[in-house]
Amino acid sequence: MNELEVFYDEVAKVAYDLFEKRGMFHGFDMEDWLEAEMIVQKRYLKKTEQAPIVAGPQADTKVMKKSKTKTGKQSR
């Protein structure tokens, strides 16, 4: 399952929970779905904000920019 499928699976579960909390009254499916999308997006944002930064190709270029110049001083 790809990330998008995982996301929408989680949205569907949250939307169903909202439907149950509403007393299982029909006619609010769009509202429940949109609210569930916002809830899940906030969860994903929290996860990405708390995730450690992983060194990658961009990290290498930053290191290269801070390398010493011909005078021996570090460039900025």
Image: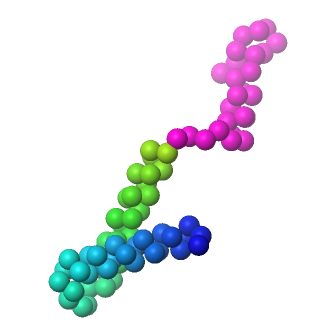
Q: Quadrant of residue 58?
A: top right
- Kindly report the secondary structure that dominates the magenta region of the rendered protein: loop
Residue shown at 65% from the left, 21% from the top: 76
Q: Is residue 3 visible?
A: yes
Depicted 57 relative to depicted 23: above or below: above
Left or right? Give the position of 67 relative to 15: right
Residue 10 screen position, x and y as percent = 42, 71
Depicted 52 relative to depicted 25: above or below: above
Residue shown at 26% from the left, 85% from the top: 28
Magenta range is: 52-76
Left or right? Give the position of 57 relative to 2: right
Left or right? Give the position of 62 relative to 35: right
Q: Quadrant of residue 70?
A: top right
Depicted 23 relative to depicted 14: above or below: below
Residue 47 screen position, x and y as percent = 44, 52
User: Closest to the observer: 49 or 16?
Assistant: 16
Q: Is residue 34 visible?
A: no
Depicted 18 relative to depicted 73: above or below: below
Q: On the rendered image, what quadrant is the N terminus found in? A: bottom right
Residue shown at 28% from the left, 76% from the top: 17
Residue 47 sits inside the magenta stretch? no
User: Closest to the observer: 36 or 61?
Assistant: 36
* Residue furthest front in the image: 1
Residue 64 sits inside the magenta stretch? yes
